[in-house]
Amino acid sequence: MADIDALARLLRAELGSGQVITDRAELRTYECDGLAHYKVVPALVVLPHTAEQVAAVVRACVAAGVPFVARGSGTGLSGGALPHADGVLIVTAQMRRIVEIAPADERAVVEPGVINLQVTKAATPHGYYYAPDPSSQQICSIGGNVAENSGGAHCLKYGFTTNHVTGLQIVAPDGELLRLGGRALDPPGYDLIGAFVGSEGTLGIATEVTVKLTRLPETVRTLLAAFPSIDQAGAATSAIIGAGVVPAAIEMMDALAIEAAEAAVACGYPAGAAAVLIVELDGPSAEVEAQFEQVTALCEKNGAFEIRIAADDLERALFWKGRKSAFAAVGRISPDYIVQDGVIPRTALPEVLRRISEVANEHGVRVANVFHAGDGNLHPLVLFDDGIEGEAERAETVSGAIIDLCIEYGGSITGEHGVGMDKAKYMPRMFGDDDLDTMQLVRCAFDPLMLSNPGKIFPTPRLCGERPGRGAESPFPGVEIF
Amino acid sequence: MGALEELTRPATDDDHVGGVPARLVAAPASTAEAAALVAAAHDLTVVVRGGGTKLHWGPPPRSLDLIIDTGRLAGMVEHAAGDLITVLRAGTPLDDLSLGDQQLALDAAPGATVGGVVATGASGPRRLHYGTARDLLIGITVVRPDGTVTRSGGKVVKNVAGYDLGKLYTGSYGSLGLITECVFRLHPRPAAQVYVQSRAQPVTAILEARVAPTAIEVDSASDELAVLIEGTPAGVRERAGLLSKVLGGDISDEPPPWWGQAPWAADGIGMKLSVPLSQVPELLGSGAAVRGSAGTGVLYAGASDISDVERLRALCVRAGGHAVVLTAPSSTRDIVDMWGPVPGLALMRRIKDQFDPGHRFAPGRFVGGL
């Protein structure tokens, strides 16, 4: 095993001592990401300020045979940035410069530690914004978004991070600094950007990101519709999509999720609703006004007992406040909870929700449902009390059963949180051995030594030829699961 | 060779790629048949052929034993209208699709197949609004050069499970394997559409008008600009009216004759140029016959000779973009670098080595001689 002390000395000389952390208590503050029940204290944490420093750290890791893990803001929900006990955690939070807002090119160039919402704030005076908007957009970093291919409520119309990245500077897992793409589209050759975005830190570290900026729409209209049943809210969603409307977002919350949001942020949703829908349309006024009437009528026709229309930005923000705070809000009604992330074909929504509720009842577990209804991305919140013997296990069982349902209905084990550490075990249920093997051909091309975020995504590492036997090592020694 | 003989037929005079004749041709009718064929062809060089509309794009293969024709790998497997997705076999011609009031929003030449459009990453005017194959493809089945059948992605639009290999296969010119099936997200077919046409001018005014155009195309030869507006009948009327005032243009139900057409003769040199948006006026002023998407910076040009190719390429590269020669007569083809400079080539070579260690699939057709 490599000598971490020697590596620390080397990196201190290279980066400056303030950017290398070895103190055990300080290291502990990096022991988990947003998925806090997995904890691993990294051997070393570095806080590079430049791409060259990231490259130097990676080269030093390669020379020493030490694994490395990149971390942005640490808000990920799949343990993608969970440290390696014998490895270096490379934190990009200090790299937070907006290099350029280029409205004439409809691009922004940013360092990976830049916070998602800051890009929009910097672009707004020019009439533009950055479209991907994960709920954590006030704190999550663009580098993390690139690693996870983050989505958000508005990706129904605007797509995910992968549809908005046109250029990357990366430090490849061998320490080489590479530029891929740029402001122009369709760079010749294999779409390495397409392969990199969403690779969860396993193909290297993004050190600069060029993203598309999107024109601010002329008009945004938002409504909140309350329904007496989930099925009716689901039917309204289907009717809207079936009418050929492409809303910017359609979000749904069930009664338990509403109860939690009320307790946390007093969002004032209609009382007695079994489900609420938030539907947002944006675009030219000439289109939006007509379609908004159509959407309102479809909600009424499908049984909405109350429809509120946001009169201004303030009211719109209030509608969204309940939705965007829903995950954290569940803490008000349950001491512990699991945030699940799965996808089903949207048309299966009512049926799958019924089956989720059956599984939950069978195990005596409560499940609050929050989801991106437009694209079938479920976020069931499985509630439990860790203080009560056996509850955590039952919650885990229900959470796993929900993922099984997603697979059974032809969906996905993750829509936006990523596979990370948490869901590697489910990958073989969604993909065959040959499929996983093929993905790892790409891994072998980028990272034959398997040093870049090892143990994530793939349950069984592939042998890359030149290093026989290496893949047989346990991918994740020393993980404590709480 | 027993299995191969059963699965293939001898090539005819029509079975060549860029002038390189093939020895054998096969047309498997299913992914399983294709896998058996590819496994049996383990020491042959292979080029995959769809509708043949872009087979003359790119350098010719270094060697060609077998053409795999996807003509029998055709048809729609599924159209889940409520979920706005479709599953299509690779050989399905895009103009054959019947999706009711929905559409697969890819622009393609008549006769082009699903697999061909994905493999070449070809795009057209509507990419401004809908994106390209890379954006619309959500799942894919590929037979690897060793005969292994593999899938990535799935049948739901939102999905981040595992690597997004569909992106890697898109635009790979068949150099990583045989695409047999693709899953796409669909869009509703707009109720109305019109074109606003004017003299060529910078796109800034269009963008500032916030009319959400589906396409903004420009043509240097006719000095014309045309904007496609889609949506509800009333909305389209109002938006097009506004835009025609902004541009000083006319509204028409039909596109101009050059819309979506390549600006080069069948035996000419055709290039794809891509530059940052702000540099599009520079390209239009280059003196070459330039045509394409002024709203995305992806345009096409006819070049008169090699020095013209080099001039346009230098212009694009200096502007922060790139220029690829898609097609050229064989005299030019033999001496021109069709792909031009390719950042990240070493990594691409390692990917090719992993997927196709014998370099048998489309050998020499892709970047850097891959």
Image (cartoon, helix red, strand yellow):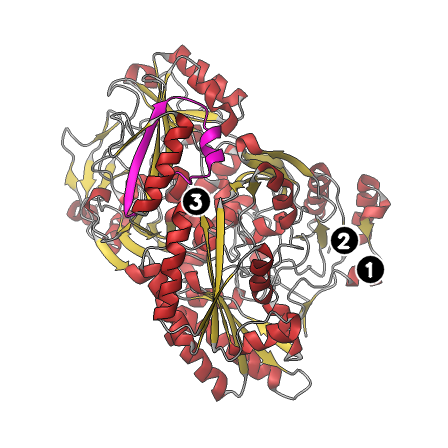
Residue B172 lies left or right of residue A264; in this view the side is: left
**Which image quadrant: the C terminus of chain B?**
top left
First to last magenta residue range: B190-214
Circles 2 and 1 in contact, beta carbons < 8 Å: yes
Q: Nearer the viewer, mark 3 or mark 1?
A: 3
> Which disc number belongs to residue A45?
2
Q: Position of residue B30 (x, y in %)?
A: 22, 54
Q: Position of residue B123 (x, y in %)?
A: 35, 36
- Mark 2: give few (<14), some (14-19) or many (20+) Cα within 10 Å: many
Q: Which residue is mark 1?
A: A26
Mark 3 in CB contact with mark 1 (< 8 angstroms):
no
Upstream in the sequence, badge 2 or badge 1?
1
Q: Which mark is residue A284?
A: 3
Q: Residue at the spot x=36%, y=64% of the render?
A: A297
Cα distance in 3D space between marks 3 and 2: 48 Å
Which numbered disc flags the more N-terminal residue, 3 or 1? Answer: 1
Q: Chain of mark 3?
A: A
Asked if the magenta segment contains residue B28, the reply would be no
